[in-house]
Image: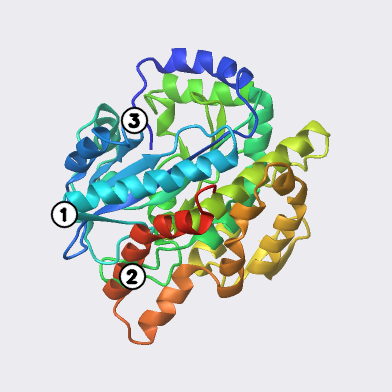
Amino acid sequence: MGASVEDSYAALDDARAHFAQATDFTVGIEEEFQVLDSTSLRMTNRFEELRDACEAGALAGNVAGELIASEIEVKTGRGETFGEAARMLIDRRLALVAEAEALGLAVGATGTHPTSPWTEQRIIDTPHYRIVEGTLRYIAWRNNTFGMHVHVGIRDADRAMAVANAMRTYVPELLALSCTSPWLEGRITHLRSTRTQIFTRMFPRCGIPDVFDGWADYDRYVRFLLATESIREHTEIWWTVRPHQSFGTVEIRACDALPDVAESIALAAFQTALAARAARQHDQGELPPPDRPSDLEENLWRALRWGMSRDLIDLSTRRAVPAAERIRSLLDACAPEIEELGLAPWIEPLDGLLEAGDHASRWKRRVEEGEDMSEIHAEQVRITATSAAALRERMGPNG
């Protein structure tokens, strides 16, 4: 969610300079993991212990807390190319699994845990999360959710706002592909992304953002929130797409956490391609007007409720189409960016999601056919632990 900012006005004053110095299409990826007891696979409040072990090893500087003590975030840092960020993500996942196993822990990457109740999770003690808990209380306590965030470097603050406006349109498609949270507290919710419902429908300044007419417009909005003491720092703006004023990036926060690291990388590659395409369209004067929030909210509802198992709305044609057809059309539109940025090898695992559908819909069917959701979750924990090593092996020594 973010780190505490010492002087929010000074940070805002510096933002335009950060974007002026940004490099286009650098990439950073953040994954949020459940911290689990290795025997029961229930969430356990051992973040600080796992963090300290990570900081003493290969993950120093690349882990952070995420509200509750049964969650840990792992960050790649800035990759100058997408391939560099992808390789760092694989390395970080391998290192996290090793540190967790050494402590008798496991880590899981699904959008929600199927059984562990929120009442058993403790809020971590950091300045930022003391602010969050003190302000939100019950809303913060209930937010036992796990996602993936992608930062794409965009040069120039006004250009970054144009890209952020454009990326709002693709939040439903990205969510539909990534859905991994059909369960909560022992029940199938019949949502495909229970994470999105909990987070975006409960947190303030969350979900689909408004449209901003350049950086000055956004700057005025943040100053308004600060002046009225609605927020104390810009990291209390939790939209699914936001300009990150400290990094000079557009941050996309749409996706559920995914067990298979190859699919996480593929979703990140897709988001990078979409952002690069929006930047190109802006530069060429061809960027379509931003879609209005109410239209996007309708599409977001479809995605969080049904994932890829029902139609999504193609807002450019104003008609509902099969989700896979809509996503394939976006991939086709991004072909120049996929080629230019070398994304093709990384994006291939999306083919499996397009053919078989989102994981949440598949897991829901399995539960309805008689499987225990805890056993399905245990399977996903194993994939969380083994997929990075499997991908590294497939890549070979020069991968």
Q: Type of residue at label 1?
A: Gly
The numbered disc on residue 379 is 2
Q: Is the residue under label 2 in contact with that under label 3 (CB below 8 Å)? A: no
**Disc 1 packing (10 Å; few <14; some 14–19; many ≥20):** few
Residue 34 appears in the picture as rendered: yes
The numbered disc on residue 61 is 3
Q: Is residue 332 left or right of residue 58?
A: right
Distance from the alpha carbon under mark 3 to that under mark 2: 30 Å
Q: Is the residue under label 1 in contact with that under label 3 (CB below 8 Å)? A: no
Q: Position of residue 29 (x, y in %)?
A: 48, 41
Which of 41/242 is in front?
Answer: 41
Name the residue rendered at 66%, 36% in the picture.
163
Looking at marks 3 and 1 on the same chain, the residue that comes earlier in the sequence is marked by 3
Residue 197 appears in the picture as rendered: no
**Disc 3 packing (10 Å; few <14; some 14–19; many ≥20):** some
Distance from the alpha carbon under mark 2 to that under mark 1: 18 Å
Name the residue rendered at 32%, 68% in the picture.
377
Q: Type of residue at label 2?
A: Glu
Image quadrant holding the N terminus, namely top left
Which of 121/41 is in front?
Answer: 41
Disc 1 target residue: 104
Occupied quadrant, residue 327: bottom right
Which of 10/216 is in front?
Answer: 10
Looking at marks 2 and 1 on the same chain, the residue that comes earlier in the sequence is marked by 1
